[in-house]
Image (spheres, rainbow, N blue to C red):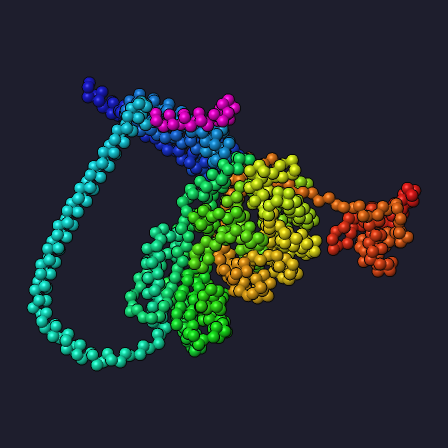
């Protein structure tokens, strides 16, 4: 009977354990298929799946082939429901938890262990979908809503409507708590586990350090033992050598006496030294270079950070000294200031002027220079010296000394010719040297001012960019006592070149397009903003190009001066420019009256006297800030206004120094009709960037040289004492924008500094109803016919004199027929036809 039951169980059904395992495999398979359908979700699949009929499933060419989901139409429906309608791609957690249930079923494990994990997983899926939905709604990240699904977006919007911006904080906290609960349901236990892990890590680090220290001590002990053994061996070797020397001392003395007796008759006549060759000159130059670098090292411990100091690492072979002095010199530059020195100094200056609470811009706003590049090729310098000496030697020009001074842009080779060599002969071979060195622009100084040498400036193949932070963050700039300090850049000696604008007193700038002129203007303004308080400095900016100085409109309530009725702080219109310059002339006259009343000679003394309370405000006395007038393009103003612009500029340049008004005028066309003789006579300080021809160079500098510059901030400065070649510091548009934003965000004055208004004097213009000229009506018809109101037209057509024609024009103006005076251009005609004119004349007759 038992045997029959056993056969029945094996033939009629499966074992219960096998059934459970099969169910587990089926559940895991369903989870895998579910995951594949979610992963391969395509938004277009649902539309194709809806259009499929039952018969299409058996048709090989049916539209069901358009469904891209890996599970076909069934997968399209499942993924649309889970991904689109519910929780997006986070629904993959359902597939994972289903597969985990299948694995538990297959392994015949207790499902009590899965209850907590299942609930937490579903909660995490909903929470993650809501979090992604909040980001998608408010930050448009991710761009596609399928990551969160419609349900996640809906839940996040409801939560945001209830708690506002706090919803993201709530979601973030819940996410962190959920992650901790995944790790361990006991939060305190999790924290303790982290502490234990940190303690173990700290113990391992201490053990590693102790082991490393032990290895170091062992190595040090072994090194000391080796050194002691070497010392003992050397002492033994020295003792043996000393014994040998004592034995052979008598023999050496006899040999030396014999050599002296042989050498005495030969020393009676000294041999004549041959002339040094090119190789000897170059080698001797390298020797002197090494000595110069060692001397610089002893004098200065902290040098400028420029990479050209890497020349100190080059090894130079020692040669025997002779009487020829030849060297190569690399400028050591300015000592860099502490990063906080300028900021500390500016904070103290801001406290001294309590009118407004103002913070000076910080040095951190400027971009730091790169730490690599900008290195000098020592072989290039050697080769250039060799080429120059060889070329001049071929033309029978003897050079007895050469000194190369390496700058950021060019290298100056100082040549010391023999006494019988004419300088003009060296100068005549400048083009030959330019061709031999294959340089872009070679400039010759014959001679160098203040030196008995001829200079040849050869551009470096690798140029160094001088950044504005390298100039401003130096002790020379920080500790200067200049009133209006401007640090343009670095000279050939790598020293910061700085001037005081009050000593210039005006500056004329010229250069071709793209040569660095606008960057130079930004450098001037940036230096002044870093050193001057808004109470002591105002800018008047005239920019006909309308875009170069537009960034400075943010500081109008701090540093800009303008007319009270002006619409824009930056003057861009020619008419407004003329009015602004005339207003500055009125301001100049008013300031001279104040200085006369105060019995002082300059603005500095006046402000000191006003600060001590010696001047009465009821009499009109006030604090006088310095005014710097920036004109970015003079050529455009001269073309449109001509003499009307030239006259106030010349007047300001002649008289405005003592009362603190200084001009910075720039142009890209240095021709004689733009930079006239009147303007040049009153601008002793001039800057020339690269220009197109020698004529332009002579126009701006009164001598050549600017046509040999190589652009990108390479410039020549002339203040009447000789030319100085400078590499202009580079200030980027981003740096200017950051500085202006930093200043503009502060609370400034209630309004910009207002210039005085010019009142037009019309008292001498005759009344149109009193003593009307007999040619008045004929002149009116002529003006309307030609649509041009000019005195010369009336002179030609009516054959009258200039004075009478001028009076008729004034009468036409007061009658409303022509417009106001416009300088060299004709007046506008306000009447369009004779009918309108006749009506106006009839009204005049009735009034009369």
Residue 72 in the image, given as x and y percentages of width and height: 45, 36
What range of the chain is rendered magenta? 155-181
Residue 692 in the image, given as x and y percentages of width and height: 57, 63
| Residue 77 on the magenta span | no
| Residue 177 on the magenta span | yes
Tell me: residue 727, above or below residue 621.
Answer: below
Residue 788 in the image, given as x and y percentages of width and height: 80, 54
Q: Viewed as shown, does residue 530 lie left or right of 241?
A: right
Could you tell me which residue is drawn at 62 percent across and 59 percent down?
A: 681
Between 254 and 79, which is closer to the camera in this rendering? 254
Could you tell me which residue is drawn at 47 percent across and 38 percent down?
A: 348
Between 671 and 486, which is closer to the camera in this rendering? 486
Q: Is residue 102 visible?
A: no
Farthest top residue in view: 1
Is most of the magenta stretch helix, strand or loop?
helix
Which quarter shows the N terminus?
Answer: top left
Could you tell me which residue is drawn at 90 percent across and 42 percent down?
A: 847
Tell me: residue 232, above or below residue 248.
Answer: above
Q: Is residue 123 visible?
A: yes
Residue 711 in the image, given as x and y percentages of width and height: 52, 59
Q: Count up the numbered dots.
A: 0
Could you tell me which residue is drawn at 83 percent across and 56 percent down?
A: 803
Which quarter shows the C terminus?
Answer: top right
Q: Viewed as shown, does residue 470 lie left or right of 320?
A: right
Between 186 and 321, which is closer to the camera in this rendering? 321
Between 518 and 662, which is closer to the camera in this rendering? 662
């Amino acid at each position: 009977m038992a045997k029959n039951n056993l056969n029945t169980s094996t033939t009629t059904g499966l074992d219960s354990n096998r059934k459970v395992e099969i169910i587990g495999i089926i559940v895991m398979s369903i989870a895998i298929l579910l995951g594949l359908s979610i992963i391969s979700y395509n938004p277009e699949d649902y539309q194709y799946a809806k259009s499929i009929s039952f018969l299409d499933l058996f048709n090989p060419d049916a539209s069901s082939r358009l469904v891209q989901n890996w599970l076909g139409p069934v997968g399209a429906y499942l993924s649309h429901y889970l991904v689109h309608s519910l929780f997006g791609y986070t629904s993959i957690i359902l597939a994972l938890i289903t597969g985990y249930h299948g694995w538990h079923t297959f392994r015949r494990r207790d499902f009590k262990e899965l209850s907590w994990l299942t609930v937490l997983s579903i909660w995490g899926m909903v929470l993650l979908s809501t979090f992604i939905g909040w980001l998608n709604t408010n930050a448009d990240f991710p761009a596609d809503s399928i990551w969160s699904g419609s349900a996640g977006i809906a839940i996040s919007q409801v939560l945001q409507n209830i708690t506002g911006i706090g919803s993201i904080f709530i979601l973030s906290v819940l996410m962190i708590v959920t992650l901790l609960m995944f790790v361990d349901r006991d939060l305190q236990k999790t924290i303790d586990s982290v502490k234990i892990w940190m303690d173990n890590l700290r113990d391992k680090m201490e053990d590693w350090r102790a082991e490393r220290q032990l290895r170091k001590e062992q190595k040090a002990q072994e090194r000391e033992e080796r050194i002691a053994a070497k010392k003992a061996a050397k002492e033994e070797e020295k003792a043996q050598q000393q014994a040998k020397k004592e034995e052979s001392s008598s023999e050496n003395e006899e040999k030396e006496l014999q050599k002296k007796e042989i050498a005495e008759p030969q020393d009676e006549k000294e041999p004549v030294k041959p002339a040094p060759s090119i190789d000897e000159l170059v080698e001797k130059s390298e020797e002197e270079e090494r000595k110069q670098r060692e001397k610089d090292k002893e004098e200065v411990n902290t040098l400028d950070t420029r990479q050209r100091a890497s020349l100190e690492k080059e090894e130079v072979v020692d040669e025997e000294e002779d009487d020829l002095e030849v060297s190569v010199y690399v400028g050591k530059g300015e000592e860099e200031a502490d990063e906080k020195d300028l900021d500390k100094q500016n904070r103290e200056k801001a406290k001294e002027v309590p009118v407004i609470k103002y913070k000076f811009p910080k040095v951190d706003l400027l971009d730091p220079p790169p730490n690599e590049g900008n290195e000098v090729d020592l072989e290039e310098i050697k080769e250039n010296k060799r080429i120059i000496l060889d070329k001049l030697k071929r033309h029978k020009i003897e050079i007895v000394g050469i000194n190369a001074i390496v700058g950021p842009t060019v290298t100056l080779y100082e040549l010391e010719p023999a006494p019988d060599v004419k300088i003009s002969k060296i100068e005549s071979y400048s083009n030959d040297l330019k061709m031999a060195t294959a340089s872009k622009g070679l400039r010759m100084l014959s001679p160098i001012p203040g030196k008995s040498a001829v200079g040849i400036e050869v551009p470096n193949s690798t140029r160094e960019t001088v950044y504005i932070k390298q100039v401003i963050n130096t002790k020379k700039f920080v500790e200067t006592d200049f009133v209006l300090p401007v640090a343009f850049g670095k000279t050939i000696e790598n020293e910061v070149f700085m001037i005081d604008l009050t000593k210039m007193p005006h500056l004329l700038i010229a250069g071709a397009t793209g040569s660095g002129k606008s960057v130079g203007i930004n450098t001037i303004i940036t230096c002044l903003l870093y050193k001057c308080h808004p109470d002591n400095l105002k800018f008047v900016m005239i920019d006909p190009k309308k875009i170069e100085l537009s960034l400075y409109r943010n500081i109008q309530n701090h540093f800009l001066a303008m007319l009270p009725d002006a619409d824009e702080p930056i003057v861009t219109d020619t008419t407004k420019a003329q009015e602004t310059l005339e207003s500055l002339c009125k301001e100049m006259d008013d300031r001279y009256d104040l200085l006369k009343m105060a019995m002082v000679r300059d603005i500095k003394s006046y402000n000191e006297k006003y600060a001590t309370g010696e001047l009465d405000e009821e009499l009109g006395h006030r604090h006088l800030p310095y005014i710097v007038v920036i004109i970015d393009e003079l050529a455009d103003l001269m073309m449109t206004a001509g003499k009307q612009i030239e006259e106030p500029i010349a007047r300001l340049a002649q008289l405005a120094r003592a009362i603190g008004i200084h001009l910075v005028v720039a142009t890209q066309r240095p021709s004689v009709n733009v930079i006239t003789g009147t303007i040049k006579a009153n601008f002793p300080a001039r800057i020339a960037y690269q220009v197109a021809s020698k004529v332009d160079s002579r126009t701006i500098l009164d001598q050549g040289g600017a046509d040999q510059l190589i652009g990108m901030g390479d410039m020549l400065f002339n203040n009447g004492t000789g030319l100085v070649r400078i590499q202009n510091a580079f200030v980027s548009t981003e740096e200017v924008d950051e500085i202006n934003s930093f200043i503009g965000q502060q609370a400034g004055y209630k309004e910009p500094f207002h210039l005085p208004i010019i009142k037009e004097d019309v008292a001498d213009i005759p009344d149109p109803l009193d003593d009307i000229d007999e040619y008045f009506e004929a002149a009116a018809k002529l003006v309307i016919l030609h649509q041009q109101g000019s005195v010369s037209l009336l002179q030609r057509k009516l054959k009258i004199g200039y004075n009478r024609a001028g009076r008729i024009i004034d009468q036409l103006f007061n009658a409303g027929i022509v417009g106001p005076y416009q300088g060299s251009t004709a007046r506008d005609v306000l009447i369009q036809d004779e009918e309108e004119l006749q009506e106006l004349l009839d009204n005049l007759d009735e009034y009369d």
